């Protein structure tokens, strides 16, 4: 049964990643050897788009046209011809900060300040100043242990192992379908007799009963597949990285074909999947001040990221929307290094490495 993308029940996840729990960091002391200056870089935002989809291969059974006559199965529940369909399952948008080569700075400390130091990521993103690094957003395990009973495995049957002599000696396709249907009814009767106890040798315990019932289910499934057909599903994913530099409206993110899966934006065999990126204007962008910029080498430069709303949709269906931090839609500010010169207790500054924003300041 073919379905279009717009008719699917899609599970769309849009989320942002802020966790640097697995990030390797480096502690650098400001000493005479580096002239009490430490180089760092601020991040810019990139978005990783991940599309997950499945391929379902449906194969018609040799007795598909007899399913209604012998088993009462409607044609809508039977694969009448071989077909392959692709289904769009999940789209995720993950926010990440990467080094912005255009925002590389040097923070200078005065020689007499108390043992100044900085934590940087391996990429040079600023984590802390005069404070030990503490990963922000470390995931907490919510996994619970459940006691489960051990269920014995049911051996996988070879399809040919269920064929009876009567079936193999049938002289026509119609007769073979009739015998196959009779075998299905016999299996169902055997199952019913077991469950009601109307058999001579009742299984001694529950696990033995499960094994026998499982074997009967496997046999019935193989016989039934000769009528309704088989279905095999494989899962795929594709991802790419996009750098949001400006707002966009109804831009084609990718195309999706129920016959091929994810295709290029120029491939008209697929329907377009659009996205909007809207700058929410949460940050007032100041007019550049040349005097302020001249003081940057003696200051700590940090980001105030803006926020953007992202929507993903097709012509017929809205798939999801979320709000993310985007440094490109924000601005940069400076913090005077004089604040770090208190000999009684140096100022401790924590940053979000992912955005370059100040997380916390402790005196």
Image (cartoon, rainbow, N blue to C red):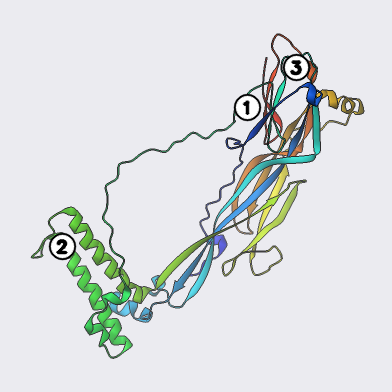
User: Mark 2 sits on what residue?
Assistant: 194
Q: Sequence order check: which comes first, mark 3 or mark 1?
A: 1
CA separation, marks 2 and 3? Answer: 81 Å
Residue positioned most to the bottom: 171
Q: Sequence order check: which comes first, mark 2 or mark 3?
A: 2
User: Mark 1 sits on what residue?
Assistant: 133
Image: 223 above or below 91: below
CA separation, marks 3 and 1? Answer: 17 Å
Residue positioned most to the top: 344
**Is residue 207 shown left or right of residue 282?**
left
For image coordinates 27% across by 70% down, the residue present is 219
Image: 52 above or below 47: below
User: Mark 3 sits on what residue?
Assistant: 340
Q: Position of residue 48 (x, y in %)?
A: 65, 49
Label 3 Cα crowd, 10 Å radius (few <14 / some 14-19 / many 20+): many
The answer to whether mark 2 and mark 1 are in CB contact below 8 A is no
Of 67 and 225, nearer the camera is: 225
Label 2: state its secondary structure. helix
């Amino acid at each position: 049964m073919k379905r279009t993308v717009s008719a699917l029940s899609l599970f769309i996840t849009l989320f942002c990643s802020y966790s640097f729990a697995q990030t390797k960091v480096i502690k650098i002391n400001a000493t005479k050897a580096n002239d009490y200056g430490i180089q760092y870089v601020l991040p810019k935002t990139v978005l990783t788009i991940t599309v997950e989809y499945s391929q379902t291969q449906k194969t018609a059974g040799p007795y598909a046209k007899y399913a209604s006559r012998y088993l009462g199965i409607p044609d809508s529940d039977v694969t009448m011809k071989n077909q392959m369909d692709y289904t769009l399952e999940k789209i995720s948008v993950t926010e990440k900060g990467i080094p912005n080569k255009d925002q590389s700075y040097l923070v200078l400390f005065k020689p007499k300040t108390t043992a100044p130091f900085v934590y940087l990521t391996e990429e040079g993103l600023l984590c802390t100043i005069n404070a030990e690094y503490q990963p922000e957003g470390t995931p907490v395990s919510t996994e619970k242990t459940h006691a489960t009973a051990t269920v014995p495995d049911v051996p996988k049957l070879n399809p040919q192992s269920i064929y009876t002599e009567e079936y193999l000696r049938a002289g026509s396709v119609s007769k073979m379908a009739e015998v196959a249907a009779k075998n299905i009814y016999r299996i169902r009767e055997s199952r019913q007799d077991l469950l009601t106890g109307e058999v001579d040798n009742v299984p001694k315990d529950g696990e033995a009963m499960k094994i026998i019932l499982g074997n009967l289910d496997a046999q019935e499934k193989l016989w039934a597949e000769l009528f309704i057909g088989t279905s095999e599903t494989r899962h795929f994913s594709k991802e790419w990285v996009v750098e949001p530099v400006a707002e966009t409206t109804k831009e084609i993110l990718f195309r999706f074909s129920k016959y091929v899966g994810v295709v290029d934006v120029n491939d008209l065999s697929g329907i377009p999947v659009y996205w909007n990126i809207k700058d929410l204007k949460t940050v007032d962008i100041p007019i550049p001040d040349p005097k302020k910029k001249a003081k940057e080498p003696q200051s700590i430069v940090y980001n105030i990221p803006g926020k953007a709303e992202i929507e993903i949709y097709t012509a017929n269906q809205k798939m999801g929307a979320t709000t993310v931090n985007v440094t490109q839609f924000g601005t940069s500010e400076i913090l005077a290094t004089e604040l770090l010169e208190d000999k009684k207790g140096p100022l401790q500054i924590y940053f979000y490495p992912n955005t370059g924003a100040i997380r916390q300041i402790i005196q």
